[in-house]
Amino acid sequence: MRSQLADELSKLDTRSFSNLGEVGKRCRALILGAELHHELQKSILEGYRSLQEKYGPELSVAVRSSATAEDLPTASFAGQQESFLNVKGRENLIGACHRCYASLFTDRAIKYRVDKGFDHMKVALSVGVQLMVRSDKACSGVMFTLDPDSGFEKVVLISGAWGLGENVVQGTVNTDEFLVYKPFVDQVSNPIISHRLGSKEWMMVLDETADFITSGKAVVNRETPPEKRSQFILRDEEIIQLARWAAYIEKHYGRPMDIEWAKDGITHQLFIVQARPETVHSQKTHQPAFFTEYRLIKRGNLLCRGIGLGNRIVSGKAKILSEPSQIDQLREGEILVTGRTDPDWDPVLKKASAIVTDQGGRTSHAAIVAREMGAIAVVGTGDATRKIQNGQLITVSTAEGDTGYVYEGEAQWEEKVIELSNIKMPETKVMFILGHPDKAFKYAALPNNGVGLMRMEFIINNSIGVHPMALHAFDAVQDKALRQIIEDKCRGYPNKEDYFITRLAEAIARIAAAFYPKDVIVRMSDFKSNEYANLIGGNLFEPAEENPMIGFRGASRYYHPLYRDAFKMECSAMKKAREDMGFTNVKLMIPFCRTVQEAIKVIQLMEEMGMKRGDKGLEIYMMAEIPSNAILAEDFAPYFDGFSIGSNDLTQLVLGADRDSELLSEIFSPFDPAVMQLIAMIIRKAKKAGIKTGLCGQAPSDYPEYAAFLVECGIDSISFNADALLRGIENILKAEEKIKKVSHSA
Ligand code: PEP
Ligand code: MG
């Protein structure tokens, strides 16, 4: 038999694979024509009997293959051989095992081994027989013991859909996704830092009528009913249980793992059904030596968006293909656009400079292969094959956070490669101004002392979108269409306030997790009324103001009847992130605090709302950004743990120059001596009062030399936008050097 197989395989045309179908068929026929060894049959049936004793005579099993060249740390080889589900009875079991062995020679597996340079005759295959988990009546999916995109190691990413797991692996559905913070999995009541509801279009179920031995198929795909699509597949306790197991499995193998899980819809039990090494990030060293920053300068119209993978930007011609056999149509450097992919597509994916698909989640086949090859991909766009024309010049960008974008035409962008290994940190703390939680895992790899400013309003805009009062006082929203939009947004959450609180807490937790245990200073919301009005339902709850920049904003809102209930929701979210999720590195900050009385009022109000300064280490900072804050700094100081200077508003208010006015842009300067004197005054007075000072305005990011002035004033920390951080560090180091020299010579 061995020599017959070798003989058949030697006839394979390994250049164009013209006879792959015939060779494969003959190899499989050789195996299927032979009888399975008697001893082997006997031990399979013995094993089956012991399963029957445990689970009853009627049990069904899954018969799965695992080849030695599969699941290596360097290549996943997923899905090359066959598996059979819901196998019942002794005869069928032996038949299924037999077919598994034969599947070592599926056309796809033969070709894959040739492509990867494996010797056919050295690859062995084992068959695993498992109790059939009835996930067709519940849900299933995969999980990684790290964030597969950034390689951030402290989280477990769980994804899944209703029904059997095939759709998740193949990327036929957009999955639900959950992120769990590993270090807290046994320590806090809620270590889940992200819930993301997927549309879960299809559910694969068992086809009880099919005779799999003749049809080879025992499953069918059904459309998921709408009410199931808007429900999360797992309860929080289940998510945490899975993450716990993932952490144990990773510990046991001593390396990041890629795991399949399933839930039985009859017994409601959870199972782990497979574990293999994670293939991308485990190959890399833990700390990246280089960091590449991309910045789009000019781009065309947005064509579509989806889940972005790979952190890069690529331009090229789009090639829309519907079958992997069309591989010849794809030229080197072209961008593949297709509905979805499976392992048959691997050679095509390898050739493409970027991949765009209609369907698929973060753990779909296309996503896994793209990561493995270091390619970039935008998956699950929903409509790429309709929105993009064949042959059209497009740009694919996955360097803008979790979301990937496809733009019309060839974009212009900048790439900066930064070496991280020898960066020395200054004494002054260097912190981030972060705009988007999606980038936190990536930025955390840069040298830093935490986050000095996270603007809550950015998060409300990006991950909530609805005015908090429209959620709190939903009954006051009369417009039917508007009510529907809000209802749709809140799908999957127990109530409207919970949607706001959970989404906000999770976005904050994601940043807090990325930087833990370093400080992450979150500023309570500071939209202006015109900006609040732009949120869904916002104009129902916002006053029309002549001068919103100096209007109903910051601290003045928090205790006002028009916003007080919304502020309470903000506080509840912070409490959830700090106490339920355990991120006590989250510190809070109050913006635009006009008077000392207002400071007292807000601090008292926060205490009433469960955010007591000093409780569980809670620090509360004040933005120093109004001239009154500088003039009365010593009077504000007792109520806060520190001041963070907002040079944007301070410049505007000292000079009386609207920060958004084009006409006044020459006047608007943080270098103006009046502004610099006030900043120096704030730092001096804060030091005297024994509280911390930082600066989180735009000035040091736009003018890194501004850092020197702040260092000379003796500031404790300076915050930068990510793209200005490294240059900022250099400038701070120089300034500190200079000060040391002067004090030595003095
Ligand atoms: C500032 O005023 O400098 C500041 C950092 O806050 P914002 O820009 O959000 O007003
Ligand atoms: Mg400000």
Image (tube, grey):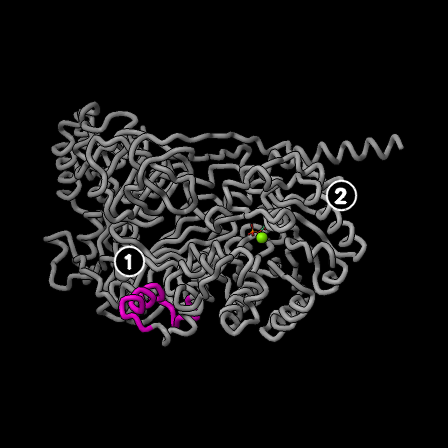
Q: Earlier in the sequence, mark 1 or mark 2?
A: 1
Please tell me whether mark 1 sits on a helix, a strand or a loop.
Answer: loop
Is 487 drawn above or below residue 671 in the view shown?
A: below
Residue 71, placed above or below residue 543: above
Q: Nearer the viewer, mark 1 or mark 2?
A: 2
Residue lying furthest right: 746
Q: Which residues are magenta?
A: 478-499
Left or right side of 680 for 136:
left
Q: Identify the residue under disc 2.
A: 713
Looking at the rendered image, the quarter that the N terminus falls into is: top left
Q: Quadrant of residue 188?
A: bottom right
On the image, the x and y values in percent for residue 158 come to 40, 56
Question: Which corner quadrant of the image does residue 218 belong to?
Answer: bottom left
**Residue labelled with disc 1:** 199
Gap in angstroms between the C-alphas marked 1 and 2: 54 Å
Residue at the image point whose x is 79% and y is 35% from the top: 739
Residue at x 31%, y 69% (from the top left corner): 483
Residue farthest toward the top in the current orientation of the protein: 15
